[in-house]
Image (cartoon, rainbow, N blue to C red):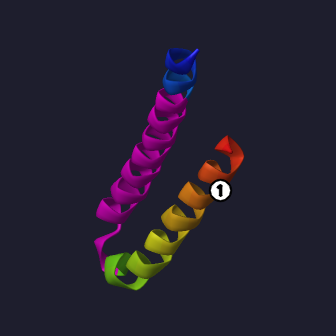
């Protein structure tokens, strides 16, 4: 029984990490295409990624 719960936690962690990685990749690729606004939008992007990760973690509970 312990192994099954551990596997569920592992899968949730993998899903959260995968979602965070895809979000960071998407934000990074957009930022690289538009280099003029990188410094202006960097703070917004970091806050957006942070709130997205918080929301995903809340949904996993």
Q: Secondary structure at mark 1?
A: helix
- For the point 45% across and 33% down, the residue is 14
Q: Position of residue 38 (x, y in %)?
A: 34, 76
Query: Height in image: 3 above or below 59?
Result: above
Q: Position of residue 25 (x, y in %)?
A: 37, 49
Q: Position of residue 44 (x, y in %)?
A: 49, 77
Main SS category, magenta section: helix
Q: Quadrant of the C terminus?
A: top right
Residue matched to label 1: 55
User: Does residue 37 appear to the left or right of 55 in the view shown?
Assistant: left
Determine if the magenta segment contains residue 6. no
Which of the pair 21/42 is nearer the observer? Answer: 21
- For the point 44% across and 71% down, the residue is 46
Mark 1, other Cα within 10 Å: few <14 / some 14–19 / many ≥20: few
Which of the pair 26/55 is nearer the observer? Answer: 55
Q: Quadrant of residue 55?
A: bottom right
Q: Position of residue 58 (x, y in %)?
A: 67, 53
| Farthest front residue in view | 1
- For the point 33% across and 82% down, the residue is 39
Q: Which residues are magenta?
A: 9-36
Query: Height in image: 17 above or below 53?
Result: above
User: Does residue 34 appear to the left or right of 59 in the view shown?
Assistant: left
Which of the pair 7/18 is nearer the observer? Answer: 7
Determine if the magenta segment contains residue 26. yes
């Amino acid at each position: 029984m312990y192994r099954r719960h551990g596997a569920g936690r592992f899968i949730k962690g993998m899903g959260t990490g995968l979602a965070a990685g895809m979000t960071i990749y998407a934000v990074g690729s957009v930022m690289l295409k538009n280099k003029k606004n990188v410094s202006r939008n960097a703070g917004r992007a970091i806050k957006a990624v942070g709130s997205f990760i918080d929301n995903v973690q809340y949904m996993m509970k």
